[in-house]
Image (tube, helix red, strand yellow):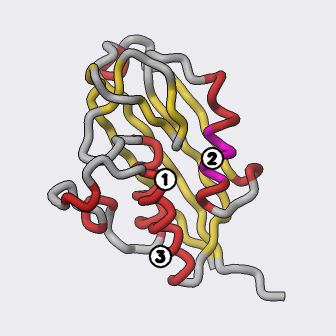
Amino acid sequence: MYRIGQGYDVHRLVPGRDLWLCGVKIPYELGLLGHSDADVAIHALCDAILGALAMRDIGYHFPDTSEEYSGADSKLLLARVCEMMREAGREIGNVDVTVCAQRPKLSDYIEEMRETLAGVLGADTGCVSVKATTTERLGFEGRGEGISAMAVVLLKTPDIS
């Protein structure tokens, strides 16, 4: 049995914060503003997995009103979502993440992002796609005001041997 989920997140770029995308620290003069480390890509992926499980969204499970998640490493949030996924009797079929940012250019970090996500997901790297796109200088991403990310996930019932 298969389940499909999709997720979306956006955060504002601000000075004085580190930029984390797909669990990788990206050298840049701005970082994403949020209650946790504001990794939009991981947040979108968490929402995609939770959506496939029909278990609401990341804000429900990790509210920004909770001090417990203040400054949290989003990889830990994703790991908890993966525990929930396994408890529900599912595993990753594949994931596809798209990061929308005019700057910085992300092509040099894509493979590290894929490997990082695969490690947290407990999935083969071949099941993890990460892409980056600009918005041709249109919208808030194009003006460099923020970064958005979209994710799609296919969950499956584990093969029983």
- Three-letter amino acid code at disc 2? Thr
Q: CA gap, disc 1 to disc 3? A: 14 Å
Q: Nearer the viewer, mark 3 or mark 2?
A: 2
- Marks 2 and 1 close (CB-CB < 8 Å): yes
Residue at coordinates 42% horizontally, 66% vertically from top-left?
50
Residue pointed to by mark 3 = 84
Residue 63: image location, x then y, percent: 22, 60
Query: 148 or 67, which is in the foreground?
Result: 67
86 in relation to 56, above or below: below
Is residue 139 shown left or right of residue 54?
Answer: left
Residue range of the region highlighted in magenta in the rendering? 113-118
| 106 in relation to 88, above or below | above
The disc label shown at residue 75, or none: 1
Q: CA distance from mark 3 to mark 2?
A: 19 Å
Q: Main secondary structure of the magenta part?
A: helix
* Amino acid bearing label 3: Met
Can you tell which of label 1 and label 3 is closer to the viewer?
A: 1
Residue toward you, 5 or 83:
83
Residue at the far left: name it: 65
Residue beneath label 2, please? 116
Q: Quadrant of the C terminus?
A: bottom right
Q: Position of residue 154 (x, y in %)?
A: 60, 63
N-terminal of the two: label 2 or label 1? 1
Work out which quarter of the rendered image holds the N terminus and state it.
bottom right
In the shown orientation, is residue 113 left or right of residue 34?
right
